[in-house]
Image (cartoon, grey):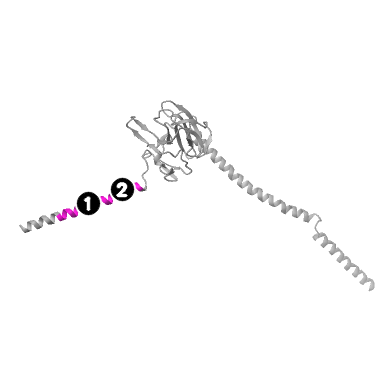
Amino acid sequence: MNFTKKIALAASLSAILLTGVSASAQYRLPASHNQQHNALIADQRPAGIDLKSAKINSFANDVRAREALQDNELFNYNFSSQSVNAYAGCDIPANYDIDVTGFVAPVKGKLTSPYGWRPRFGRMHRGVDLNLHVGDSVVSAFDGKVRLVKYEARGYGHYIVVRHDNGLETVYGHLSRTLVKPGQRVRAGQLIAKGGNTGRSTGPHLHFETRFMGLAVNPEAIIDFENYVTHKDVFTFDKRTYERAQVYGPKRAKSSASKYSKSKKSKATASAKTKKKSKKSSRKSRR
């Protein structure tokens, strides 16, 4: 019996030892585990940053691709043309919205001659004349790329044509000196020339044109030359009315006032007629 108990006790001890060993073997982790675990967590942070950077880079690449596409469409079409109108023969849309935010006045001289027919010279004046002194700074009206830098003795004199990111082209004429080259990227407000009196000119001034797809748009349809700001953030080109200056607030108020005065006058006239008739009828009754 004692021997049997000894065997049973030995067996139970063996079982306990074996269980302890297997538990230890199952749950004990390698000594380097904690180090590896921490390294894995640390590695996840750069991975997250790389993902964010990848998204930013992807967006930036997409913007660059769209800008390149715009450049291809806008600045590759007849960009090397030596004519002021590089769009001759193109189909012109009936309407087109043009973003004119970011406008900077090329000069801030007084408008001395508007857009339109000049009976004195028997020709169209396709821009506006802005007063300046020879040597005054002339700046780009919008962001864009210089297309032409030329001289025309019997016309613009020294002149520059800039094609802008918004689709417009601007012409700067009668300059004394040009400071940019064809193909050069310019920003709104950047110095591009010095004012002058060259070419077919009767005195120092800047001849300034705004063109859309070659058509000379009346600059006063886009710009308020009293305050040197655009009338609106978006100029809607209309093929039927692009040569007309815009009519705004004060002129409308004046017209409404004149309507009011006309109606008041008509009422007064009507009352006067009524009085006249009443006088006639009273005279007849006396007779």
Q: Please state the extent of the stretch shown in magenta in the rendering.
A: 250-275
Label 2: which residue? Answer: 255
**Exactly how many numbered labels are in the figure?**
2
For this view, does 278 lie left or right of residue 100? Answer: left
Whether residue 239 sits left or right of residue 260 in the image: it is: right
Q: Earlier in the sequence, mark 2 or mark 1?
A: 2
Q: Is residue 203 left or right of residue 31?
A: left
One can see residue 144 in this view: yes
Principal SS element in the magenta part? Answer: helix
Q: Position of residue 257 (x, y in %)?
A: 30, 50
Mark number for residue 266? Answer: 1
Residue 218 visible in the displayed image: no
Does the segment drawn in magenta span residue 264? Answer: yes
Residue 17, compared with residue 153, is above or below; it is below
As drawn, 147 above or below 105: above
Q: Position of residue 144 (x, y in %)?
A: 50, 37
Residue most toward the left? 287
- Residue drawn at x 71%, y 51% is 43
Regarding mark 2 in the picture, which secondary structure is present there? helix
Location of residue 211 (image quadrant): top left
- Amino acid type at image mark 1: Ser
User: Which mark, residue 151?
Assistant: none
Q: Is residue 266 magenta?
A: yes
Residue plotted at (91% across, 68% down)? 10
Residue type pointed to by label 2:
Ser
- Indicate the quadrant containing the N terminus: top left, top right, bottom left or bottom right: bottom right
The quadrant of the image that shows the C terminus is: bottom left
